[in-house]
Image: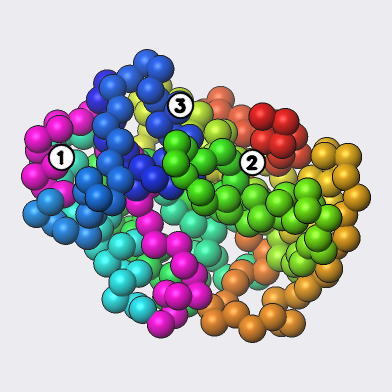
């Protein structure tokens, strides 16, 4: 199987490339290789490479910056997906696209399921939801919603994610500001990539899936567990969403349910297990 991975310089793409490379032909495309917002370039590249699966890891992830640049975030997180859908369709390829927990308003009292009604707030969230819709228009698409990604960067990669910054502060003996009112289901990129590989190679039913590590925690819980695993002292500085000046709204409760994946036999490890493996990797 030949897999094209877009956004190959990112954290998630690095894990996808590691997961697929041992047994499949992977064509990794960074932005300098393919600008997914250029429809002609997308058509030409996919037609030339002729992949069996297109895995879209390219995205605009500056949530606050998106509030000031609606056109850019729509172009990268929605229109680019539409271009990839068209090109994948012409090539007869499967499409994998990654969505976001931000499509929900955060008012739930339980982990969100795939059939829960989205209610995005902010330009980033709206663009990600539109990207989901465009991807699902492809008859052979997997849309995997992930959140709070953490993992090992690829060669030359520097992006750490929120958890990477927390761990860096713990190691440095610095105070760690953490949200006590934002609940998430962290996503270890290694586990997301493994689930992606299993979905694609097993030819599981196409559609929308939530793909995160199991369980839910506040960022204060996550930081405390990281310090425990590292056996290091930690000074947590509790903050709330209301106490910090953020341009874009964040959902307070956005844990996601993996029940649909589990029904296929793809059981995502707990976030605590994922965190331990990440910290001891």
Where in the figure is residue 230, as x and y percent of width and height? 82, 39
Discs 2/1, front: 1
N-terminal label among 2 and 1: 1
Check residue 48 for magenta coloring: yes
Q: Nearer the viewer, residue 122 or 66?
A: 66
Relative to 102, is 270 on the left or the right? Answer: right
How crowded is the residue under tag 3: few (<14 C-alpha within 10 Å), some, or many (20+)?
many
State whether residue 179 is above or below residue 133.
Answer: below
The quadrant of the image that shows the C terminus is top right
- Give the quarter of the image for residue 218: bottom right
Label 1: how many Cα within 10 Å (few below 14, some 14–19, many 20+): many
Q: How many marks?
A: 3
Left or right side of 77 for 196: right
123 vs 263: above or below: below
Q: Give the labeled residue for mark 1.
A: 46
Q: Quadrant of the N terminus?
A: top left
Closer to us: mark 2 or mark 3?
3
**Measuring 49% from the left and 70% from the top, which residue is drawn there?**
63
For label 3, the residue is 19
Q: Earlier in the sequence, mark 2 or mark 3?
A: 3
For the residues bearing labels 2 and 1, Cβ distance under 8 angstroms: no
The magenta span reads 42-68
Which residue position is annotated with label 2? Answer: 213
Say above or below: 241 vs 110.
below
| Residue at 47% in and 67% down | 62
Question: What percent of the width, then of the height, locates residue 151?
Answer: 58, 41
Residue closest to the eye, 175 or 163: 175
| Quadrant hosting residue 68 | bottom left
């Amino acid at each position: 199987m030949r897999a094209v991975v877009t956004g190959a310089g990112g954290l998630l793409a690095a894990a996808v490339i590691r997961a697929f490379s041992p047994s499949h032909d992977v064509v990794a495309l960074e932005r300098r290789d393919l600008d997914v917002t250029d429809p002609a370039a997308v058509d030409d590249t996919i037609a030339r490479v002729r992949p069996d699966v297109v895995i879209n890891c390219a995205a605009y992830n500056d949530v606050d910056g998106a509030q000031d640049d609606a056109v850019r975030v729509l172009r990268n997180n929605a229109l680019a997906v539409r271009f990839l859908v068209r090109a994948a369709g012409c090539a007869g390829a499967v499409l994998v696209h990654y969505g976001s927990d931000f499509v929900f308003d955060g008012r739930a009292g339980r982990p969100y399921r795939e059939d829960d009604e989205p209610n995005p707030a902010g330009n980033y969230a709206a663009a990600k939801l539109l990207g989901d819709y465009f991807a699902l228009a492809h008859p052979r698409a997997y849309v995997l919603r992930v959140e709070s990604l953490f993992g090992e960067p690829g060669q030359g990669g520097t992006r750490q994610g929120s958890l990477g910054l927390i761990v860096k502060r713990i190691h440095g003996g610095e105070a760690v500001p953490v949200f006590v009112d934002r609940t998430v289901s962290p996503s270890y990129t290694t586990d997301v990539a493994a689930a992606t590989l299993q979905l694609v190679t097993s030819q599981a039913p196409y559609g929308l899936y939530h793909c995160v590590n199991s369980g839910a925690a506040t960022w204060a819980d996550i930081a405390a567990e990281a310090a425990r695993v590292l056996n290091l002292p930690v000074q947590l500085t509790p903050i709330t969403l209301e106490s910090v000046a953020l341009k874009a709204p964040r959902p307070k409760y956005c844990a996601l349910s993996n029940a649909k994946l589990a029904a296929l036999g793809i059981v995502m490890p707990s976030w605590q297990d994922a965190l331990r493996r990440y910290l001891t990797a």
